[in-house]
Image (cartoon, rainbow, N blue to C red):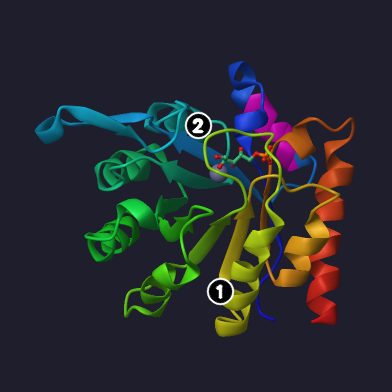
């Protein structure tokens, strides 16, 4: 398998008041990427005078990415949980994001334009899917002439750190890995020492982990355990 293990601590579980030093601490502990969860809770739909949530939470946006970028050269793996990702491509590019992963559920009409714009701003495009979304929905984006470079399989409902891993999602990872041997496949939600074996043997190579890393007395041990599991599974596949 040509894909390498990437361990991406989710900064959602960090101490946001010390973001730069938390980022440095994670890199020192062996992190490859820093996973940044960009959530925007509400978009009003004026026609129906109602609103819908993409996630029931609010986190950070481009200004925070821009501040962090001044302190680190690390790959900032940005996961956008918003209903209108296109509006954020330019600001995130300017702010210094490295990867821009949007959700397929809100991009059915404009994913081609999104991918093209993300690349034109020098970022790497990824597509994410919620637990209820069938895996087939991302195939056209991976097989396009101008394809996404990563698929993020959510293993919890997006919104918060610290939720329980959903093992049922591993069928999606297995299917993707079989179909696309050299694709970066990321899993996000509930990953840690007790769940990594399932994700690694299914074929995931990019591992997001928030509470299991930040909550550990020695994050470096958890990061190396996650990496070893991915590498062992790749050897045995
Ligand atoms: C959830 C986020 C995740 C979250 C993962 O919506 O996308 O990145 O921070 O946190 P843990 O590893 O604690 O489940
Ligand atoms: Zn995430």
Dot 2 alpha-carbon crowd within 10 angstroms: few under 14, some 14 to 19, many 20 or more: few
Quarter of image, res 49: top left
Quarter of image, res 105: bottom left
Q: Residue at x 78, y 38 (%)?
A: 212
Residue at mark 1: 183
What span is colored magenta in the figure? 20-27
Q: Which mark is residue 3?
A: none
Q: Residue at x 66, y 79 (%)?
A: 2
Q: Quadrant of the C terminus?
A: bottom right
Could you tell whether 72 is left or right of 110 in the image? right
Q: Residue at x 58, y 43 (%)?
A: 35
Asked if residue 79 lies in the magenta stretch, the reply is no
* Along the line of sight, the residue nearer the viewer: 20 or 177: 177
Dot 1 alpha-carbon crowd within 10 angstroms: few under 14, some 14 to 19, many 20 or more: some
Q: Is residue 183 visible?
A: yes
Q: State the separation of the CA atoms marked 1 and 2.
A: 30 Å
Residue at mark 2: 70
Asked if residue 22 lies in the magenta stretch, the reply is yes
Could you tell whether 207 is left or right of 144 in the image? right
- In the image, residue 49 sits, relative to residue 226, either above or below, namely above
Ligand 2, image quadrant it occupies:
top right
Prevailing secondary structure of the magenta residues: helix
């Amino acid at each position: 398998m040509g894909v390498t293990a990437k361990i991406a601590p989710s900064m959602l579980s960090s101490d946001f008041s010390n973001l730069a030093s938390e980022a440095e601490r994670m890199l020192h502990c062996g992190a490859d990427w820093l996973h940044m969860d960009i959530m925007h809770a509400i978009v009003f739909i004026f026609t129906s005078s109602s609103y819908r949530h993409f996630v029931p939470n609010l986190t950070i946006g481009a200004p925070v990415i821009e501040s962090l970028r001044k302190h680190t050269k690390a790959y900032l793996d940005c996961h956008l949980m918003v209903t209108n990702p296109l509006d954020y491509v330019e600001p995130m590019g300017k702010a210094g994001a490295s990867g821009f992963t949007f959700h397929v559920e809100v991009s059915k009409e404009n994913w081609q334009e999104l991918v093209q714009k993300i690349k034109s701003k020098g970022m790497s495009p990824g597509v994410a899917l919620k637990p209820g979304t069938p895996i087939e929905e991302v195939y056209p984006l991976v097989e396009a002439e101008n394809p996404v470079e990563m698929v993020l399989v959510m293993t919890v409902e997006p919104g918060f750190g610290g939720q329980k891993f959903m093992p049922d999602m591993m069928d999606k990872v297995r299917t993707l890995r079989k179909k696309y041997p050299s694709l970066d496949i990321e899993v996000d939600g509930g990953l840690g020492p007790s769940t990594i074996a399932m994700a690694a043997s299914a074929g995931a190579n990019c591992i997001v982990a928030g509470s299991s890393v930040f909550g550990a007395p020695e994050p470096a041990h958890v990061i190396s355990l996650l990496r070893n599991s991915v590498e062992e599974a790749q050897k045995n596949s």
